[in-house]
Amino acid sequence: MDLFRTPELIAPAGDRTALQAALQAGADAVYFGAEGYNMRQASRNFSAGDFPELAELCSAFGAKSYLALNTVIYDSELETLDRTVAAAAASGIDAIICWDMAVVEACHRHAIPFHLSTQASVSNFKALKHYASMGARMIVLARELTLEQVRYISEQIHSEGLDVQLESFIHGAMCVAVSGRCFLSQEIFGRSANRGECLQPCRRSYRVTDIEEGFEFDLGTSTVMNPRDLCAVTFLDQLLEAGITGLKIEGRNRSPEYVATTTATYRKAIDFIMEYHTAADFRERWKKLSHELEQELDKVYHRGFSSGFYFGRPLNAWSSHHGSASSERKTYIGTVTKYYPKAKIAELIIHSRGLKAGERISIQGPTTGVLFLQADTFHAKDTPATHAEKGDTVTLPCPAKVRMNDKVYVHEQR
């Protein structure tokens, strides 16, 4: 059974800069949180007053806008929840991502589509069919499913003619608990993961004490509860062949350059697969390209890469990195002071570290998004220069418009 369909690339947005970055990088849809009701409270969430602007901006790029309201909801919050859903519907938001039945009911009441979050842990066709009968039009499957299990569910959807799409995560952090249903942060810190407040104690090092003898052993993050990040780019073609049409990148807490790089990389992967998957030499060309794309993804934050559960129980799943294992690190160096559109020149003020000719930089801002540049040539103190110091004003070629107060970073090899 041919399950291959044109997929939708769904990117995260924790703030306006990341939102712009996702859209500019080619996302088909962007998902973002509302204050108080999403699984990434640490991200700089949006208020109901922002919804019209967000929906309009996404629409201008030909992308859909999805609002994540995927935490548990308490009775004291129902009135505010109803106002939030009503505001989303009135603003033209395309769908709500949720799993609490109170949110589902609010979506019905205000006639806005809803997508079922992975928090619902849908791992079989009967569960999917039940939620589809309630009106879910996109269902994010449990992260613990294999490709074989996903394909079976896709085949059942096809055979019964259900009007529902399958969505799966393709990149980003993996939770140590089943589909993110963890209570460790709540137990230790009183900060519930299911309320979007997880402090990730699973990522930390622990010391185990032998009670009888008093011996102590330090357990590193590589051996306890710190999973590697999911990276599906090398087998993305197999996900599409299994019938997945919603490809979601995790990362509303991560940086704008993470959003820009992951979205652009998976955009390139999807476009190549769609154009060449029927070609006789596809497998050979795809193998080469996908490994190049994996190297590109290695530049931004990750804890090491894993194939997740797609091929069964993860092997070598635990990360030895408390922080990022990325091949590049970024350092803040200054801000934009002016842009000259006719000459396509950006003016920067260096605040720290300095800048050397040939370095890779990014310029980031809420309207600019993320723009990567190679600073091969620039002027400092109005003369050609090979380096600039703290306090210097720098001008350099910049092909796209940037804005005053946009932040400037250097990206260098670790």
Image: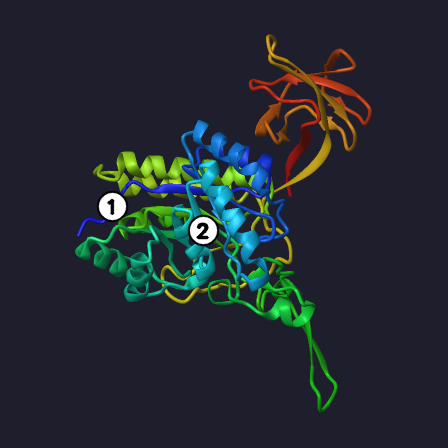
> Residue 4 got which mark?
1
Q: Which residue is mark 2?
A: 97
Amino acid residing under circle 1:
Phe
Residue furthest right as drawn: 391
Q: Nearer the viewer, residue 337 or 192?
A: 192
- Image quadrant assignment for residue 354: top right
Task: List x then y, in percent, for residue 133.
Answer: 29, 58
Q: Can residue 38 be spotted in the picture?
A: no
Q: Quadrant of residue 327?
A: top right
Could you tell me which quadrant the C terminus lies in? top right
Q: Vertically, is 62 above or below 119?
A: above
Task: State the image quarter where residue 255 is shown.
Answer: top right
Q: Measure the alpha-carbon separation of dots 1 and 2.
A: 24 Å
For this orientation, the residue located farthest to the bottom is 212
Mark 1 residue element: loop
Amino acid, disc 2 = Ile
